[in-house]
Image (cartoon, rainbow, N blue to C red):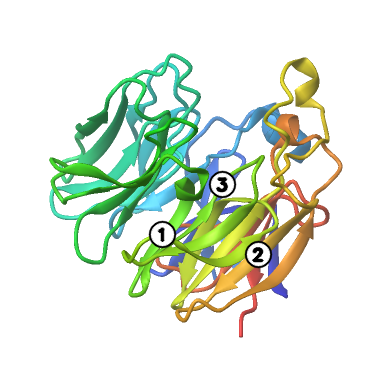
Amino acid sequence: MAVQQLSGYKPLCYIKEALYLYRKGLIYRLVENHPEKVIPVYPNTTKESLRVLARLFRTEPKYAMPINESQMLLVGHRTIKVVDVEKHIVKDIFSSREGFSDPLNICVGREKWVALWGDYGPNAEQDFVNIYGLTKDSKVETVFSFESGQVRHIHNIIPKLSGGYYVFTGDQEKRAGIYKANAAFDQVEPVKIGQQQYRAVVGFDTPKGLLYATDAVNEKNYVYLLDGKGEPQKICALNGSCIYGTEFKGKYYLSTAVEPDENNRGVTSWISSKRGEGILSDEVYLIEIDDEMHFKTIEKFKKDALPMKLMQYGAIQFPRGKMEELWCYPVAVKKYDGKALLMQMD
């Protein structure tokens, strides 16, 4: 199905209809199907000399989110950078708190804030969890805090069509699940909490309701539609957890993940090939859902032989922003690992 491949390039985001990519410390712009250097953002080290080392040391940025017609937020190495691709300026604006890692997602904000994100990571001390907003003058503010022990971390913040936001929180706490917030974040209240079916990373507010996919490693996963009329409706079953997704031309694309058993701990867990009970196969599925909630699997990628925890989970990542074409980035799969793929869709 892929019609173009760029080996060694990670697609990051679209800015003004141009696709920006990452490779070995540099940001590139795709011009007439060829990557052109734009600006360095990380030191180019020997850890990126081989793909296997890049995976082992997690040298790539996690993702990037466009925030205007010349800037993106680049997330990785527990730091958020503002990268201006026109002025060629890179500036650190945020560092993750102790006990947390990189934010899992950044949301394009409305009105007061250009972007919003929340603390994400182990949070072993069950500390309070913040949501942050980036103002138009590039200042980072704490806009809301969950109390200590209430939730472990923030998975995602999703704009509501009617105004305000949904907040996806995890993981096992009784009060973890889906919350809603008004535009100012001075009113935050639970929508559905306390069960795994309300815990997700990927979601989209659609005219039919909140569409989301669960992220359980040791329980079966589903795509749900929450239409405000009671319990969520199952749209389809998934063969694994879901932590990546995107919207393209009115359809929604989800990647399942191949993850290790969470109950397997200690040194041997780093090299174990045992999947979690909710991970039903060694395949990464690319799933399409249309605006009528019809679904189909459009591609499958086989997990490679390298251990999941040490060398990254099998999954498909997607660039952020309004996509002109459907690019994806398979990770830890056979044949296509570390290649930007342009998918030919109907």
Q: Given this view, does label 2 or label 3 mark the residue nearer the observer?
A: 3
Q: Position of residue 61 (x, y in %)?
A: 53, 39
The residue that label 3 is drawn on is 215
Task: Say if 292 sits above or below 170 in the image.
Answer: below
Look at the numbered disc 2 and give the secondary structure of its residue: strand
Residue 286 bears which disc, if any?
A: 2
Label 1 vs 3, first from the N-terminus: 3
Per the model, the C-alpha gap separating discs 1 and 2 is: 26 Å
Q: Position of residue 238 (x, y in %)?
A: 65, 59
Look at the numbered disc 1 and give the secondary structure of its residue: loop
Question: Is there any visible trace of residue 144 in the rendered image?
Answer: yes
Identify the image quadrant of the N terminus: bottom right
Residue 231 bears which disc, if any?
A: 1
Tell me what residue is drawn at x 42 percent, y 45 percent: 105
Per the model, the C-alpha gap separating discs 1 and 3 is: 18 Å
Label 1 vs 2, first from the N-terminus: 1
Q: Position of residue 55 (x, y in %)?
A: 70, 36
Q: Is residue 220 left or right of residue 335?
A: left
Inspect the image, locate mark 3, and give the three-letter code of the amino acid beneath it: Asp
Tell me what residue is drawn at x 21 percent, y 42 percent: 188
Q: Nearer the viewer, residue 270 or 54?
A: 270
Q: Position of residue 140 (x, y in %)?
A: 22, 33
Identify the image quadrant of the C terminus: bottom right
